[in-house]
Amino acid sequence: MPATSEDLPLQFARTKRFSLGVPRGFAVSPDGDRVLFLRTASGRSTTGLLWLYENGEERPLADPLALGDGGDAGGEVPEAERIRRERARETSAGIVSYATDAAVRLAAFAHSGALWTVTTDEGVTRRIPTAGPVVTPRPSPDGTHIAYVSGGTLRVVRADGTGDHALAEPEGPDITYGLSDHVSAESLERTRSFWWSPDGTALLVVRVDNAPVQQWYIGDPAHPARPPRAIRYPAAATANARLSLHVVDLDGHRVDVDLPQEAVSHPDGGWTDPAFEYVAQADWSEAGPLAVVQTRDQRSAYVLRIDPATGATTPLHHLTDTAWLEFVPGTPAITAATGLVLTTQEDTRGLLMTGTGVRTPEGMYVHELLGTAGGRLYFMAAEEPTEAHVWSYDTENGFIRLTDEPGVHHAAVGGDTVVLDSSTLDGQTVTVLRDGTPAGRIEVLAERPVTRPHPRFLTLGERELRAALYLPTSYEPGSPESASSESVSTASGHGRLPVIVHSYSGPGRQTVVKAARWHHAVNQWFADQGFAVLSVDGRGTPGRDRAWETAIHGDQLMPVVEDQADAVRAVAELFPELDTSRVAIRGWSFGGYLAAGAVLHRPEVFHAAVAGAAPTDLRLYDTHWKERYLGHPDIQPDHYDRCSLVAYAHKLTRPLMLVHGMADDNVVPAHMVRFSAALLAAGRPHTVLPLAGATHLVAQEGVIDTLLRMDLDFIKKSLDPRTA
């Protein structure tokens, strides 16, 4: 337990946003007897271990501290692995990822650049000699071989440590085999780039040619003697990496996959580009290898069956959408009972089982296809945006919801075992179900926040905005005492409660959920300093329906700003003790962009802002993510002009603090520098806080905790009428 003198910001930093001690990365054996997972040894340890749950008990299977090099600090993490961790927002060290054979009896992982294996039967770890530093090792389904990437070369070694040899070697310095390019990892969330055949005799491999991608440089201002780091960054309207697929057998014989060049029957739009530039998904199951290719404008995708002997492809399905295509993680998949399982692009994102013609029920938003076991599909879906539940489907029983308690539920499956990972407002639990009956639990060792959050979930305004309101812990809204603010100390020491809006409200992420999330505790901490804190999931956020998500098509800023402004007005009608003459807004990444945009465009509602890692010039963000929402900046420049912040710097009339990690290779520091320069040129005072050595995910102790206090101090001073 943390010391009683430790406050929330320090605990937040030391627990890596309460992520330490949380079990994750579950793998369930096909017979349901074994569950592997990752977890640190406590809520303060930053070293990840590989664990085994079996026969109702859990035990460490591989501990990096016992491997002889003292954790990641004892060996160099390869550059490709460092990049992979940054894309995955990985905050821990030690064993942070692993892969298994089909039976979940052999696990392989990379540690400090070395390849290690461990068997679940004996629990003996073994270092496997390799030709160089190892990234993304993956055993063959039969456990006899391990494929890995080293220096951009895809290699394979036998599980006994013999026979290491190259399968596919780069033809030049900008080429890699088996690694994800920036867009695939960051925007498409496709972290894998090679897949074993079920019989373990061949692999489907992605080749990446980064030569067309422009090269940027990120320097370290704190260490001017160090050369800048070169990165390949495909900004909007610039060239993407060239991707291709290849089938490679264990002798290195290669078959090139004949991918289609352009989509036919392609939807029209203000900008159309039917060329297939993205490999969105791929897999190799008993039904054969599959791939999903997507066009540059993201309105067409083909699901392709691949002939591994010839490389010929056959389109199984053509997906289209007039705005952009969203893919449910885990799809496509093929089962004997349901046939091809696809993402539907209709009123609500769902699943279509082509073999039966069955679709998920109307109004159900599918977040992820979790897996198949025992002839059943398991998936995660929402009927109410603030919750997500685990469902199963089979042809005999139809759709069955497996979870009831309000929260966000996830699962891993194998045989008759379901590992149910449930996060509710009371905390997180991991329950092992056998035949639908609880058979045990996997411990969650994460610390509980010293500040206990008390969010009030609300539905606000005509658009039924989902929102969470946090009031000071001792505050009782609606009482005569609260109306006069005599029962609680407000931020300025007098009057009604000033307001802080803390929203992300961007694509791909929800904050208004009935689950244990770090932002609930952080928002409550700000509230306990004498504020009302409001979080809003506006248009563009997932979990509702396609119309809600695509409402930002062509304008990614103003609809979101208007939703925040409308929510402030609506919540003040419900809680008159809120002082809407003193409203600040803070956020990070898209939330930082929203915060800065709010004080530029709606200064009558928002009176101060803290904008962290804000993408201020959207032409500087990557192709897939920005062209998805705004199109091509050369063809639809008005979309980018309207949504970028730099051109509106002259409109700033409110206090604004810009915060940015100077090693950020996702939202590069140029965003902050260009915006600050425009503000200076327009004579608009503002505050700049550069974070030396910090990336897009700021998690360092002494930085993230201090940053929370500085946010609070800036907001207090900015909203205090005595300093106006």
Image: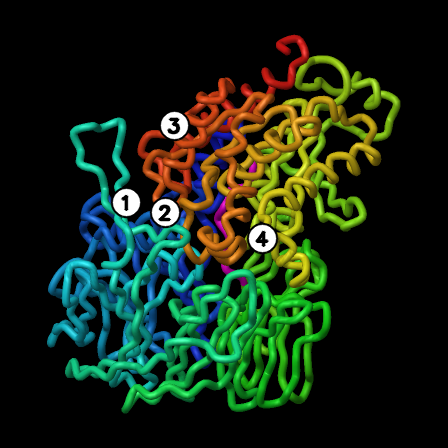
Q: For the residue labelled by badge 1, is the local secondary structure a helix, a strand or a loop?
A: strand
Q: Label 3: which residue?
A: 690
Q: Position of residue 359 (x, y in %)?
A: 66, 79
Q: Residues within 10 Å of mark 2 (few under 14, many from 20)?
A: many
* Residue 92 image label: 2
Judge depth for marks 2 and 3 and give the one in front.
3
- Distance from the alpha carbon under mark 2 to that under mark 1: 28 Å
Q: Position of residue 477 (x, y in %)?
A: 81, 30
Q: Residues within 10 Å of mark 3 (few under 14, many from 20)?
A: some
Region of the chain picked out in magenta, as a range: 441-449
Lower position in the chain sequence, tag 3 or tag 4: 4
Asked whether the beta carbons under mark 1 and mark 4 sit within 8 Å of each other, the answer is no
Asked whether the beta carbons under mark 3 and mark 4 sit within 8 Å of each other, the answer is no
Lower position in the chain sequence, tag 3 or tag 1: 1
Q: Position of residue 404 (x, y in %)?
A: 70, 63
Judge depth for marks 3 and 4 and give the one in front.
4
- Distance from the alpha carbon under mark 3 to that under mark 4: 31 Å
- Distance from the alpha carbon under mark 3 to that under mark 1: 19 Å
Camera sees residue 93? yes
- Distance from the alpha carbon under mark 2 to that under mark 4: 38 Å
Lower position in the chain sequence, tag 2 or tag 3: 2
The residue that appears at 64% across and 61% down in the rendered structure is 388
* Residue 286 image label: none
* Residue 554 image label: 4
Q: Label 1: which residue?
A: 216
Q: Nearer the viewer, residue 260 or 170?
A: 260
